[in-house]
Amino acid sequence: MKDIKRTEIAFLLKGKCDDLINTEVCVKGWVRTKRGNKQVAFIALNDGSMLGNIQVVADLQKFDEQTLRQITTGACLRVNGLLVASQGQGQNVEVQASEIEIYGSAPAETYPLQKKGHTLEFLRDIAHLRPRTNTFSAVFRIRHNMAYAIHKYFNEHGFYYWNSPLITASDCEGAGEMFQVTTMDLDNVAKKEGSADYAQDFFGKRTALTVSGQLEGELGALALGKIYTFGPTFRAENSNTTRHLAEFWQIEPEMAFYDLEDNMNLAEDFIKSLVQYALDNCREDLEFLQQMYDKELISRLEFVCAHTFQRLTYTEGIEILEKADKKFDVPVAWGMDLQSEHERYLVEQHFKKPVILIDYPKDIKAFYMKQNPDGKTVRGMDVLFPAIGEIIGGSQREEDYDKLVGRMNELNMNIKDMDWYLDTRRFGSAPHSGFGLGFERLLLFVTGMVNIRDVIPFPRYPKNASF
């Protein structure tokens, strides 16, 4: 074959190639479809650079039968040919093939994606191949763009990227649902007085995969001013719901000298910025997902950007829910942890806009949240979205050493193991705030997908870690 430099399909189809018309080009990619007649084959080729395919027109008389037989859905090709104005609808240019090389075949009788119309459930079982479908290539391009937009936003707002540890000896949320990390022989665990002797383990103590980078993030904020973490977190929760994963990604900014009001302002501006970035930069993929899965997707994204979020206290929210002309599956009472049905009622039916709920009962929130003067509530906040419910959780952090220790004692926490954290309150303590945004929860909202397993390349959940 002629040695022609490859051109990405997105470059050819997005109107940037006028000077290449009637010249030879090289395109490479995977066959989406092949159709034709006895004289010509029309091959839809996709290289992942965009949703659209470029049409390759192959005169059957120019190619041997063995090559043509291998051009099936899923096969990977290199094509040299003349770039010409397209006579068909849907694209401006096509490639008239002069040379075709089969990089890799995909036999029709065994390739799982040979046919169209597979369910999302089926595709989860072949997560190693599903990025080749239109749906998941669109989702994962959006995922990339959202990750870029997150780093871009924080960089432009004076934040520093902070790398919190994945292996930790502390449980940020106090839930205990953590994956243990050990190098000990589980068939012959070293023991002392009948229990595992963690002094013999790699780190000399019991360690686990982190559930949050927040506590370490606070250390960064109380030195650098404003930081954010963005990395994987882990939760050993035996849950098979559409909203939970065992391995997921979180964005957790922490800001010195921010109170709850500052925190809410940042959360609203941040998430609106991300949604707007998706609207501005992922339009083709969003339109495809809207057509295939969620007819109101784009209008819902635009709605979030256009409206100021409603702010109210947890107590006010409970009063609204108690008066609602609706029977909830879980009865409403002050002091309860609100369920998704309650959150979505406030957002979708009562206020008809995103909601920020603040001042939660301290008994249902984490130890580090700043206590209100009433002794019953804390300066926590949750951002509630349509179709999702809670998408952001955060708070003003308790900066008073005595109050923090008192709360930790109430919860029977091991204060000695948290001595490093308490040092930030002993030495130069300052008001500070932060929040966490689950990356996959954001992607559920932005893509319109309904199962969180469909917005991460390799979902981890109970009884599933096969690839």
Image (tube, grey):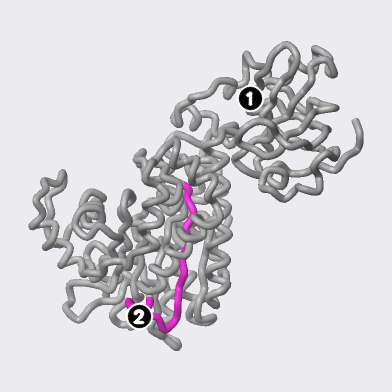
Identify the residue at horizontal 73%, vertical 11% (top origin): 38
Q: Mark 1 against mark 2, which lies toward the viewer? A: 1
Tell me the magenta residue range.
247-262
Instruction: Report if residue 197 is visible in the image.
Output: no
Instruction: Kindly identify the amino acid type of the residue bearing the numbered disc 2.
Output: Asp
Residue labelled with disc 2 = 259
Q: Quadrant of the N terminus?
A: top right
Q: Which mark is residue 33?
A: 1
Residue 61, image x, y percentages: 83, 15
Amino acid type assigned to the residue bearing label 1 in the image: Thr
- Choose top left, top right, bottom left or bottom right for residue 313: bottom left
Numbered-mark total = 2
Figure quadrant of residue 55: top right
Instruction: For residue 327, say whether it is visible.
Output: yes
Q: Residue furthest bottom?
A: 428
Q: Is residue 363 above or below residue 188?
A: below
Task: Report helix, strand or loop for mark 1.
Answer: strand
Residue 340 picture location, percent across and down:
26, 50
Residue situated in front as seen by the camera: 306 or 363:
306
Q: Compared with residue 402, is residue 441 higher up or lower down, i.e. above or below? A: above
> As drawn, is 51 to the left or to the right of 404?
right
Labels 1 and 2: the sequence-earlier one: 1
Label 2 secondary element: loop
Q: Residue 435's spot in the image, x, y percent?
A: 40, 67
Decide: few, some or many residues near mark 1? Use Cα within 10 Å; few <14, some 14-19, many ≥20: many
Nearest the viewer among 216 and 318 is 318
Q: Which residue: 37% across, 71% down? A: 415
